[in-house]
Amino acid sequence: MTDDQVLEVLNRTARQAIGGYCGLTGLCGIAVAIGACFSVILGAGCPKDQETATTMRVVAKMVNTIANETGPCCCKNFVRKSLTEAVKLVKEHLSVSLPIVSENIICKHVERHPHGCRKEKCSYFGKDTTTNEQLTECKT
């Protein structure tokens, strides 16, 4: 990817992935952001065929991944789950292997959640089955 492509993704995302976007449109901003990445990388556009179809399929997978994590909504969870799924889709569609780092994250922000935490329904909630050396604490 070139610097210009990175800037293009950031500009596209900044216009759409804003706070409260999910409530406003029914679509989480991380799905839009990942869609913008694939769109730019693949060169998707209205006159294109498979490039656009692949991008839309990626966004559909992101939305489905996020929908499975609602109740209440948690942006941290949505981003983690979406990035994990995106890594798989990058491998599938772009033949690029990226590391998945969200496997050992335990969220420490239960009390800070503005909508109420999903607690045991969330895969990042207090399931400390690793040693401290393997544990990655969520700081965002």
Image: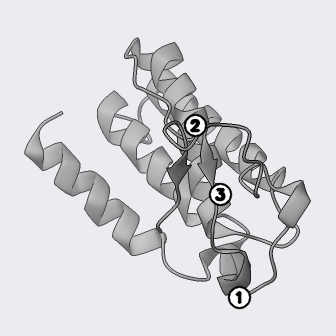
Hey, which quadrant is residue 120 in on the image? bottom right
In x, y percent, where is residue 23?
Answer: 72, 80
At 88% across and 68% down in the image, what residue appears?
A: 71
Element at label 1: loop
Q: Relative to the observer, which residue lies in front, 53 or 17?
A: 17
Coloration of the structure image: one colour
Q: Relative to the observer, which residue lies in front, 92 or 132?
A: 132
At label 2, the amino acid type is Thr
At 61% across and 34% down in the image, what residue appears?
A: 85
- On residue 27, the disc is none
Q: Is residue 30 above or below residue 4?
A: below
Residue farthest top in this picture? 95
Whole-number angstrom distance, CA of label 3 to CA of label 1? 15 Å
Label 2, on which residue? 84
Q: Residues within 10 Å of mark 1 (few under 14, many from 20)?
A: few
Element at label 3: helix
Hey, which quadrant is residue 103 in on the image? top right
- On residue 78, the disc is 3
- In the image, taking residue 125 as reference, residue 39 lies left or right, namely left
Label 1, on which residue? 114
Q: Residues within 10 Å of mark 3 (few under 14, many from 20)?
A: many
Whole-number angstrom distance, CA of label 1 to CA of label 2? 24 Å
In x, y percent, where is residue 50?
Answer: 50, 22
In x, y percent, where is residue 134?
Answer: 52, 36
Q: Residues within 10 Å of mark 2 (few under 14, many from 20)?
A: some
